[in-house]
Image (spheres, rainbow, N blue to C red):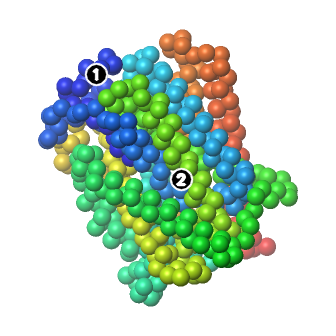
Amino acid sequence: MAIGSITPKDKHSRRGKKVVDENSPLLPTRREGDAGYGGEVNGASFTGAVFNLSTTIVGAGIMALPATMKVLGLVLGIALIIFMAFLTDASIELLLRFSRAGKSVSYGGLMGEAFGKWGKVLLQLSVLINNVGVLIVYMIIIGDVLSGTSSSGVHHAGVLEGWFGDHWWNGRTFVLLVTTLGIFSPLACFKRIDSLSFTSALSVALAVAFVVITVGISIVKLISGGLGMPRILPDVTDFTSLINLFTVVPVLVTAFICHYNVHSIDNELEDSTHIKGVVRTSLALCSTVYIMTSIFGFLLFGDATLDDVLANFDADLGIPFGSVLSDVVRVSYAAHLMLVFPVIFYPLRLNLDGLLFPSARPLGSSNTRFAFISSGLLIIIFLGANFIPSIWDAFQFTGATAAVCLGFIFPAAITLRDRHSIATKKDKILCIFMIVLAVFSNVVAIYSDAFALFKKNASPSE
């Protein structure tokens, strides 16, 4: 993910957009207090914009998608991934259209124009909840990979445990503490998103390596007859199993959330008319990656697929060099998440600063405030990763609350508000559909999760 920036000379852009407030947390501008922000920025190319938006979309959500196939079956699972991509494209198109009409250069500015100060605050809170949830998921996955997990009731050994045996220093809490202090903290100290461009490019290469190796392992096992036929349709036998289908909705929503970064990528483009092509190309690319990972991940592990599919790679894959490939898959994606972490942390910190200190001087010019906010967020994320048992639980919370608001409810609300009288009847029908679908499916998902939790807690005493 990359957050765009606008130099002082760029404020009167090629589209005549009004200047965003310098403290706007959703579109970090190059501010006077930030050293090195004074030069001209060339417009981004179509390819570069696709790269930025694609890295915004692909993240930890890919790890939970094979588990959605276990719930939905391949046919319904793939169909929902494609459906979610089309719905995401429609919601982004609405955001861009109303932004053009109101000359807004950020999601926060658009919400502020439609609903005033509290609309912008609500958006900032949603970004905070979403990004904190996503970063907790990242840290949980890193802990699963390096130290193992027992969230499913069966212990799956981590890479360090497999290499060195079970020791106190490769336990989950200590490993995550070292990772936070040794990797996340230094990378979070950068005050400019530009400083993370190299690590972002490397993270994409690692993610591609994960997908390619997973597909390769699946094909080799398929040819050798080592894989059975995965479930095609969901297994619905009663009302509870039907309701359980809705638990995948927050996961799918989270997997496609990129709306809070679309404006900054749009503002970087040399030709803003290309933004629709950028969005659709990115969604097509990411949907392809998601579908391949879902199919081949579920094909590999079947009904044994865990919420975090990386944890499944601790077992013998039954192919030559299987143990080496398993370690490469797990370590490559864990490293990918480590490098993406500070990129998502960047807008999270700016949003929190905008909420806590809306009238203060730029964050980059205050080392004390910068350190205080950065440290506080890292502590919260670290604690969340240690106390939340699995990525599925984290996805259920963020996907059913903040993510669904950012992706569908807010764009629909802006359209129905229609401050510029440009919404068509078709737009309004679509928006009502999005709101009803988002609210209904996520309420059912929360109910299903709560019911399962109460049932789990009650079972030992029965």
Examine the image and state in which quarter residue 164 appears.
Answer: bottom left
Relative to 168, does residue 246 appear above or below in the rendering? above
What numbered label is drawn on residue 13?
A: 1
Compared across the picture, whether 459 is left or right of 37 comes to right
Gap between marks 2 and 1, in whole Å? 35 Å
Residue 330 in view in this figure: yes
Find residue 119 and report its horizontal and vertical position in percent.
47, 28
Find residue 8 and report its horizontal and vertical position in percent.
19, 27
Residue occupied by mark 2: 289
Relative to 85, does residue 299 appear above or below in the rendering? below
- Along the polypeptide, which appears first: circle 2 or circle 1? 1
Question: Looking at the image, which residue sits at the far bottom?
Answer: 165
Which amino acid type corresponds to the residue marked 2 in the rendered image? Val
Compared across the picture, whether 41 is left or right of 286 comes to left
Q: Helix, strand or loop at disc 2?
A: helix
Residue displayed at 30% across by 64% down: 183
